[in-house]
Image (spheres, helix red, strand yellow):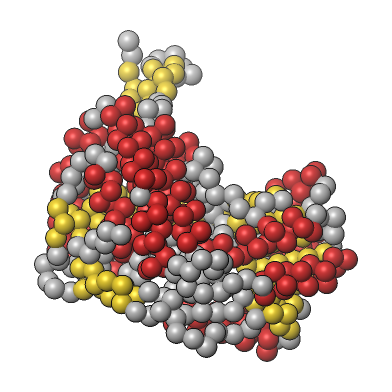
Amino acid sequence: MTMQTQMLIDGRWRDGVDSERIDVLDPATEDLVAEVSAGTPADAVAACDAAAAAQPGWAAAPPRTRSETLRACYEILVAHSGELAELITREHGKPTADALAEVAYSAEFFRWNAEEAVRIHGTVSTAPAGDKRVITRHPPVGVVAMITPWNFPAAMITRKVAPALAAGNAVVIKPARDTPLTALRVAGLLEEAGVPPGVVNVVPTRASGDWLDAVVDHRAVRMLSFTGSTEVGKMLLRRCADRVLKVGMELGGNAPFIVFADADLDAAIEGAMVAKMRHSAETCVSANRFFVESPVHDEFVERLGAAMGALKVGNGLEPGVECGPMINASAIASIDGLVQGALQNGARTVTGGGPLDRPGFFYEPTVLAGVDPSSPITREEIFGPVAPVATFDDTDAVIAAANDTEMGLMGYVYTTDLAKGLRVSERIEAGMVGLNRGILSDPAAPFGGMKQSGLGREGASEGIYEFCETQYIATNW
Ligand code: NAD
């Protein structure tokens, strides 16, 4: 396993201008995995300078050249799947099977965008008055700053970098402090695959605010693409207003998971386990609130409790582990605070209910029944292996409850009545709905949220246009 611990600026691996380091811990053991160079504002500026110098040449390359380079990036990521998955598990903790799935998903963004790179279409039309031609085209934004979270150390980077590069941009990435190793290794592989020096730069840091200030104030930077919490996203939006930067915002979720009495319960349990537990339950699209129609509520709770209680928890590198550690100690404190709050409000524990007493940051897979809708656990992202279940009898009421949140990223609906399922799905205020499906992420589909869950979409055909401007040229001929 290759571990890159220096930052990547202008195609060169180097330490920061001072000797600051970031300690990367294995959350399963709390052991030190590596010390990574921590960038200062001066390093961030150097990365933006490098991106600004490299971007015009990359944008001028024929779309076919960019396409083929992206295809080579796809191939190299796939060829290094095992190594990348191990790195992800070492610094994030997720089980190897989830880490491998993440690498495959990450690589697919390069394959998809290799295909899209040659299909960035403009238009030509005649103005209604007949006095001119309206020509539109989509040049790249230029230099894009990217800030990513720790929960998908590879995918949250490639979902941005692949479309940005396909459109002809250069990028400066700040990976999360907990998980910089995967980002650095991915960037190294992209260069090996033929991405020119300076087009992809990675500068981890311990001082996110200073990094942000340096990058936002850099004249060449024209966009900030962020994935992370709504709280931080709002702060970044305010800061980006200073230079009217274009933004992409993939923010927090609070997904409802609705099970109607006519649902296929086997499928609903399977979907619930995937929607709740994949990647150790640390995803923005995790089912956060379960609503089960009363005739099937008790059976659903019992079966979900049995399935959650049977999960093998442990170090993600060990064979057969299905739920790894949480990312750090503060995650455990936050999850447990929500669980204790729900219990104080009258919920009952079906299975689990607390942290595991062992080294590392482990929390028992937990099911809570009878959760009061006013409990903080229904308002906040749990970001851990806890499934709070409530019951319902009325469709309008459950839709109102599902939408009673400022978040709008994802919703899940289970019913065998497809017409009802579609009607309910259309009324869920979320950018994405899984109808009888617990997993729906796909590079060919638009990923993103309504309400305070975000601005813009990643993936699909529209994902690439997020990293483009629209220019209109008026002419007569
Ligand atoms: P976070 O908001 O705490 O951090 C995200 C990134 O922002 C990190 O790199 C962090 O260092 C950086 N950051 C924090 N403060 C900053 C500042 N002042 N200036 C500049 N950068 C700053 O989120 P997290 O804990 O890393 O990730 C979990 C959150 O991400 C959850 O809310 C989850 O829902 C969300 N998420 C959303 C999506 C999506 O696609 N919508 C995907 C994954 C995660």
In the image, residue 471 sits, relative to residue 395, either above or below, namely: above
Residue depicted at 30% across the width and 59% down the height = 1
Disc tally is 0
- The image position of residue 177, as x and y in percent, is 32, 69
Residue closest to the eye, 26 or 429: 26
- The image position of residue 212, as x and y in percent, is 27, 63
Give the residue at the far top of this rendering: 477
Give the residue at the far left of this rendering: 17
In the figure, residue 70 lies in which quadrant? top left
- The image position of residue 196, as x and y in percent, is 20, 41
Point out the image quarter for the C terminus: top left
Residue depicted at 15% across the width and 66% down the height = 16
| Residue 309 in view in this figure | yes
- The image position of residue 64, as x and y in percent, is 31, 27
In the figure, residue 56 lies in which quadrant? top left
In the figure, residue 402 lies in which quadrant? bottom right
In the image, is 440 to the left or to the right of 6? Answer: right
In the image, is 157 to the left or to the right of 299? Answer: left
Residue closest to the eye, 50 or 79: 79
In the image, residue 28 sits, relative to residue 132, either above or below, namely: below
In the image, is 416 to the left or to the right of 30? Answer: right
Give the residue at the far right of this rendering: 295
| Residue 347 in view in this figure | no
In the image, residue 29 sits, relative to residue 451, either above or below, namely: below
Residue closest to the eye, 317 or 36: 317
Residue depicted at 33% across the width and 43% down the height = 76
Residue depicted at 38% across the width and 17% down the height = 132
